[in-house]
Image (cartoon, rainbow, N blue to C red):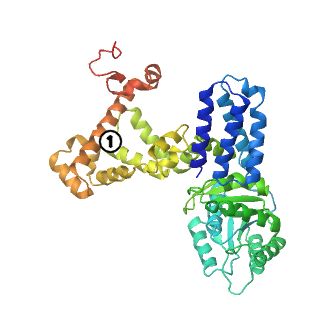
Amino acid sequence: MFETLSGKLSGVFDGLAKRGALSEADVTEAMREVRLAMLDADVALPVVKDFVNKVRERAVGHEVLDSISPGQAVAKIVNDALIDALGGAGAVPLNLNAAPPVPILMVGLQGSGKTTTSGKIARRLAQRERKKVLLASLDTQRPAAQLQLAQLAERAGVASLPIIAGQTPVQIAQRAMDTGRREGYDIVILDTAGRLSIDEALMEEVRAIRAETDPAETLLVVDAMTGQDAVNTAKAFNEAVGVTGVVMTRMDGDARGGAALSMRAITGAPIKLTGSGEKLDALEEFHPERVAGRILGLGDIAGLVEKAADTLDHEESEKLALKMMQGKFDLDDYAAQIRQINKMGSISGILGMLPGMGKLKDALGDKELDTSVLKRHQAIISSMTRKERRTPSIIKASRKKRIAAGSGTTVQEINRLLKQYDAMASMMKRFSKLGVKGLMRQGLSALMPNGGRPPGGGGRPPFG
């Protein structure tokens, strides 16, 4: 989402790094570039002005102009200012400090992903917080909206309020809270109706529901893809009904990121959660420092570790690690690795969380990393017998033809897979012989063929 802004800011810092000592004129020129980059990223003008002024004020101080690496010093100041603009370090959790059932009011325009987000939050609270959650649709405007939420509730593994035709949104809200109290629910999520645009009838309805239920959280759901319109929507809702937090959907889209950078400054309400994709587990806490890190190409290792912890099968990972330590590695293990990678999402998304990978993505241009080879490898391995997967050395010409026909691939592709497998299996064997201490002593090059030395080099350095 922030690729354009990230690329332009990286260019500014690269330019500063090449200059060595900085003058005040260098800083002014860099701030002009930063200002243009942020405006191009659709960040609200007042936010850009405030941001640039803060950075310039600190960047022309002695600690930057006199520092050993002024380019890095300016990058650090911009990083701090980005974190500030996004709401300050640390995620802001949902406020559940109220007597149960805690009401959470979901508001927003039609098409912003409000109903899906309600289902995502319900699933998250039920699974992570072990809360008993009731979902209630107050949308009497859109046909089948209540049925849609009931289906989402079923998929999320939570309860939904039974549908009674003819009730007003306020009556449904009253019934939801009564049911929550009577049946011992911890949280009641109230999904209000949206409109195609902001109008007084919508605001009046939301105000009436809010007065009736006194929610602990009024979460505004906005579509990040709508750019500056999302900021205008947030401002209008905040002024009319008061918003305690923002959920930004479609954060995996190709919008320019200006809405996220503007939201806190314009509304005063923090971004609490972000959604990407339709899957019910595609919801994350919003960490300003991590987003700033990704914008500046510093990566988000903490986010990657959390993603891995949430999605990977730990039992399978431990079994695989044990086999690797013993130097055993077959095609079943390789297939298990591919399944784990697929669970993590797109390879490009994972790359974006690693420090310094922005330049690699730039080098690829618009091309998505080709992961189709992993799917073909899965198909090839699935077409093998159990014995073939366990002992790939028995796979000769006639078996290769049969496997190719069964997997819709070619013999050449099977040869490539087996060659790749042999290289991985050899590395595992070397790892088991070296052990962790040997690896620490000799370094990663010891896992390479010939211990990382050129073939026939007798251990002497090249051209030595």
**Residue pushed farthest front?**
25
Q: Is residue 242 left or right of residue 437?
A: right
Please state the horizontal and vertical placement of residue 319, each as a whole percent of the image.
43, 41
**Residue pushed farthest bottom?**
166
Asked if 145 appears above or below 45 in the picture, the reply is below
* Residue depicted at x 24% and y 58%: 406
**Amino acid type, mark 1:** Asp
Please state the horizontal and vertical placement of residue 76, each as a whole percent of the image.
68, 34
**Which of the 4 image quarters holds residue 278?**
bottom right
How many numbered callouts?
1
* Residue depicted at x 65% and y 25%: 69
Please state the horizontal and vertical placement of residue 215, each as a whole percent of the image.
79, 66
Mark 1 nearby-residue class (10 Å; few <14, some 14–19, many ≥20): some
Asked if 448 appears above or below 181 in the picture, the reply is above
Viewer can see residue 164: yes
- Give the camera-side residue of 451 and 385: 451
Give the quarter of the figure containing the C terminus.
top left
Please state the horizontal and vertical placement of residue 343, each as a whole percent of the image.
48, 52
* Residue depicted at x 26% and y 48%: 413
Q: Is residue 436 left or right of residue 393?
A: right
Label 1 residue SS: loop
**Residue indicated by mark 1:** 330
Viewer can see residue 387: no
**Residue pushed farthest left?**
398
**Residue pushed farthest top?**
464
**Which of the 4 image quarters holds residue 78?**
top right
